Amino acid sequence: MRLIYAMFSTLRMFGRHAALVGFLSLAGLTVAHAETIVVEGNVRVDKTTIQSYVSGQPLDAAKKDLLATGLFQSVDIVKKGDQIIVTVKENNIINRVAFEGTKRLKSEMFEGELQLKPRSAFSQAALDADVARIKEIYARVGRSNVDITPRIVPLENGKIDVVFKVDEGSKTGVKTIDFVGNNAFSAGRLRDEMQTTQSNFLSWIKTTDVYDPDRLAADAELIRRFYLRHGYADMRVLDTKVDFDQAAGGYRVVISIDEGKQYKVGEISVESKIAQIDSATLRARVQLNKGDVYNADLVEKSILGITTEIASRGYAFSQVRPRGDRDAASATIALSFVVEEGPRVYIERINVRGNTRTRDYVIRREFDIGEGDAYNKVIIDRTERRLKNLGFFKSVRISNEPGSTPDRVIINVDVEDQSTGQFSVGGGYSTTEGVLAEVGIQESNLQGRGQYARLRGSTGQWSKGVELNFTEPYFLERRLQGGFDLYSKESDNSRFAYYSNMKTGATLRLGLPLTEEFTVVGRYSLFNNNIKVTDSTNVSSAISASEGQNLTSAVGYTLEYNTLDNTINPRNGALSNLKQDVAGLGGDSRYLKTTTDVKFYRELNDTFVGMIRGQAGYIYGSDLRVIDNFFLGPDLVRGFSLSGIGPRDGGKGDAGRNGLGGTTYWGTSAEVTFPLFGLPREAGIKGAFYADAGSVFGYSSPASLTIVGNDQSVRTSVGTGLLWSSPIGPIRLDFAVPVTKNDYDQVQNFRFTAGSVF
């Protein structure tokens, strides 16, 4: 019975197959199965390879598959009697891909970007795609009107050269960036938050004014985050319109936004659904208070703080669910943070992809969790921010995918490396250094290991020196910043003193970031000062006593607190440090030196940024040399020269050139900066008004010296400045007028400092 059933099933399947063959024949397709397959026209491709594509499948499908290989320009398949005739015309093989006319971009930049490659088969479709890709690459550097003419050069044995002739054309920039719907902030203030800038007189040395759709999309997110930091929780970017203005020769960008209303923080609550964790202890981790302007960044930091706190108590699977309840009538947002046990999900694997230069471990060490640990989205988001802040990558994206089981997740880290090296040739002038030339080489991702190294040499009118710096950000595979500095500098002080100095030394550093804002750095320094008296007749005996070699061996530390929103052009936040050094571990000097410097920045409105600064220092020692003291001038009170204020020997020579320094100093400054009217804000040129006050005092000396200027009298000044964050380095010009001063103080109204990298 089973045999009969099997035979019946076989016959039924055969019938279906026959019906299928009949259907295909009716549709104009022929099944090549038992016929002889004859191949014609092949030169390099073996006929058996072609036959394998044809045998056993419909002829139309076989033709499609053969063309899909990219080996053939054309394929023709016909049936003649019991033969299948396959006629092919092979694509040429590419010998090399070359470029002509590339000046702004090197041809190496296109490697890896094109489909056509040496030793691969040529196809017209790939050529067309490569022409489009080259145009896209040029468009990203402002050459949208580039013209690409491909040329095929025939060679022997069916090989060809593909040559792209490039007419780069003129640079096409973003002429204007305008906003629609902005009421709370000016267009200029919003443009300050963007990476894309408008074309101006600096366009020839920058590329940020180039239209880049990816960068513009990122700018939209930067603007949204800016509004969220200032309380506009409902803000939306409605549209970004880009038009090319042929007459202006550039792009015009219009960004439409809906600001919504500004919210303040209402009631704040923290609810813990984990019995062992008290809600009150977590409330201290919330960085907002009732009545504050709503700030999405501080909400995220609060979530991170609470998450870190509960994870440190052993609750790795807990999660923090924030909730914001808007009250439109009162324009407040009530914040609640609910802590509860989350799903038990573990990290199965972390995949790192796209890094062609940076080592895997440089990326992986930024994770505070690893494979096998409990998954925590807040910590993963922090890792993504860290990777972006490294500056090693053009793009960073972290995504998840399901693991092998429901309680496992795979983390994918996709990055794209970017250039991190810099060779600089610089020049500048300052009223203390004179004309200065500088050459340096810097690499912030040395050999893909994440290490920082810089070698710099300078020679100037009144000084010259060389310096080598190296930093390992993960010393001993821990979050410790280990490094060293080697330096040698010769200074000619004859303009304001009767001596010169050659300082040579080394410093070993070890830094530990305690939080995202707070860092402690320990150091050991060993340096030698070689003092040479240039006028023995008029020099103070205190300075003569310091002539010759003086070796200092000191150990110290720095505590730094940094909450600046931007390290280059800060508008809000604080930057403060406290330093202490103890000298006496060998060497000739014995002292305890303490200094502090605190700066507060506050955005007053769209135009003005205020800054208040306080600084102070004290050195204590039983046998201090002149070289150990504080010598201050324009860095403390502008309007005075270097070593222009403080104690002096008034009994010999020119007291103005016999500055002795002080053991104590203090200073305070208030400054307001603003964009200069009539100039594009993107140029980075600002004006400043300021007022300074300070004093240097406390020199103790033998009774035979006649000391002047050793009291605690306050020096004050007011002034104005011009600041430029130029592409070739920071430039600042100050004009300050002393309001109160002592008779022997040295005045310097103008101060110009400039450094460049080009």
Image (cartoon, grey):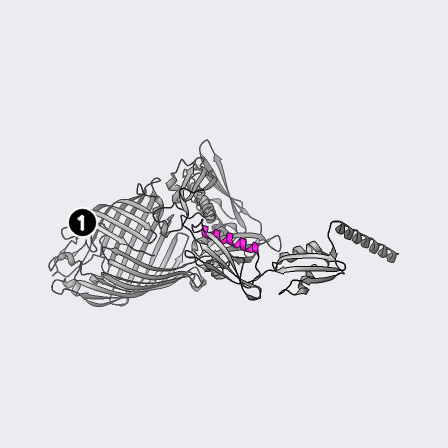
Residue drawn at x 15%, y 58% is: 657
- Could you say which is closer to the camera, residue 542 or residue 179? 179
Can residue 309 be seen at all in this image of the molecule? yes
Figure quadrant of residue 689: top left
Figure quadrant of residue 541: bottom left
The number of numbered badges drawn on the structure is 1
Indicate the quadrant containing the N terminus: top left, top right, bottom left or bottom right: bottom right
In the rendered image, the residue lying farthest to the top is: 329
- Could you say which is closer to the camera, residue 685 or residue 150? 150
Q: In the image, is residue 491 part of the stretch drawn in magenta?
A: no
Vertical placement of residue 96 versus 613, above or below: below
Q: In the image, is residue 140 part of the stretch drawn in magenta?
A: yes
Can residue 567 be seen at all in this image of the molecule? no
Q: Amino acid at mark 1?
A: Ser
Vertical placement of residue 98 versus 382, above or below: below
**Residue on which the image places disc 1:** 713
In the rendered image, the residue lying farthest to the right is: 1
Mark 1: which secondary structure?
Answer: loop
Q: Position of residue 121 (x, y in %)?
A: 58, 61
Q: Position of residue 30 (x, y in %)?
A: 74, 54
Q: In this image, 552 relative to 400: left or right? A: left
Q: Position of residue 455 (x, y in %)?
A: 34, 63
Local crowd size for mark 1, using a 10 Å CA cut-off: few (<14), some (14–19), many (≥20): some
Highlighted range, magenta: 122-146
Q: Main secondary structure of the magenta part?
A: helix
Q: Position of residue 615 (x, y in %)?
A: 27, 51
